Amino acid sequence: MRVFFRLIIFITGLLFANSLLAQENKPVPITTIPVQPQTNKVAAKDTIISNKKGVTQIDITDVLEEVFKIKHKATVDSVTSKPTISIIPALGYSLVSRLGIVLSGNMAFRTGPKSRISTIVASTAYTQNRQYTLPVQTSIWSKDNVYNYIGEYRFYKYPQSTFGLGSNSNIKNEDPMDYSYFQFNETVLRHITGNLYAGLGYVFDDHWNVSEKGNPNGTLSDYAAYGKLAHSIASGFTLTGSYDSRDNGLNPSKGGYGFVQFRTNFRFMGSTSNWQSLIIDLRKYYRFPEGSDNVIALWSYDWLVLSGKPAYVDLPGNQWDPSSATGRGYIQGRFRGAQMVYLEGEYRYKITSDGLIGGVFFINLESFSAGPGTRLQGIQPGFGPGLRIKLNTISRTNVTLDYGFGRQGSNGMFIDVGEAF
């Protein structure tokens, strides 16, 4: 009966979330289809089946099995070489997309008994605004952890508005744009010492059929003033350093992460112009109170154009980081500019001792410059609460439902699979 009550709460929460006007096109999950490996148990530091008080942890699959009297199949208590897969068909509504349907999921596995957890995260969506997205992110570890292969691949047919350059831009200056976008980004990191890795990569960004409608008041848009390009390519090499002591990449509870990437684009490699950029991504996780399962998560994300002039659509923007997570509280692309400085803190806590339901509260600060060579403008805050529903105890994957608030009346629901950072 207790589990049935939890299921009612879960379904009611999703129906309520689905009725809200969201500001970001991450639809509301409706159901899950987890696939569990049937192999021998493997001890691992990232295994959490019981909490520190000995309470068995459960996920949505366990709830459904008990409610509908489905015969429980024995599963392992850790990620093994057989993939652990979580899949969510979804339906939702947002201000960016209107009605949208999506299929999202992730896969976690090990390439060897002592290897770190490898992950593949992907989704595909089609919306009422005729937006089609297909992003895929991969992090594959070799069996001896000597190499880490990191990939990011995207295909977007993506009508989306821009609001001008800099963090002082006004939400009333909405300029509807449309374009198609393809990205190929692959990096190979090699172990240096301890948790430190470094390596090289190649990145290719192609935007075509880029168009705008212009500012609603008829004034010159920042996109037009910056320089219209119906087609632009950015192609070049990356030099990357990475430090990762997290216990789990999908849902860390301790440790830290550091990522620094220098990117240089060249005309002789097909780029529209020569330009260089730098990304600095730093994260830290603390259990608080000490000894509990609750976590304080801290994040700094700086994205800086060092030289040259990228195409407008290649400039840093909120929620254009690899996880589309920066700037909860604002619509994707609300802020754009040559320099982006971002800070966020989040407190993650359990609501039920079995880990099925949890909560968060987050606050973030971001500042952008306008075009290259200009200074950072005002700081824009975002904050809000969130709900966590355990999708898979083995990989520790959560369905995340956050409601963010920002300035100038910006607010909305943000839905995803896995934590923001």
Image (cartoon, rainbow, N blue to C red):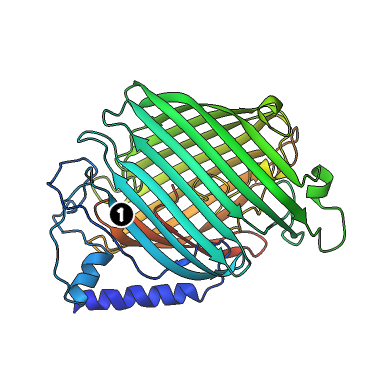
Q: Secondary structure at mark 1?
A: strand
Q: Which image quadrant is residue 105 in?
A: bottom left
Quadrant of the frame with the N terminus: bottom left
Q: Let me know if residue 281 appears in the view.
A: yes
Q: Which image quadrant is residue 416 in?
A: bottom left
* Location of residue 262 with respect to 118 vertically, above or below: above
Which residue in the protein does label 1 denote? 85
User: How many numbered marks are there?
Assistant: 1
- Nearest the camera: 396 or 381? 396
Category of crowding for the residue at label 1, using alpha-carbon neighbours closer than 10 angstroms: few (below 14), some (14–19), many (at least 20) = many
Residue furthest toward the top? 192
Q: Let me know if residue 338 appears in the view.
A: no
- Residue at coordinates 67% horizontally, 59% vertically from top-left? 159
- Residue at coordinates 84% horizontally, 45% vertically from top-left? 225
**Does residue 100 appear to the left or right of 225 in the view shown?**
left
**Does residue 281 appear to the left or right of 146 in the view shown?**
right
Residue 48: horizontal and vertical position, in percent? 21, 50
- Nearest the camera: 174 or 104? 104
Three-letter code, disc 1: Ile
* Location of residue 11 with respect to 127 vertically, above or below: below
Residue 53: horizontal and vertical position, in percent? 15, 54
Residue 33: horizontal and vertical position, in percent? 31, 64
**Does residue 176 appear to the left or right of 410 in the view shown?**
right
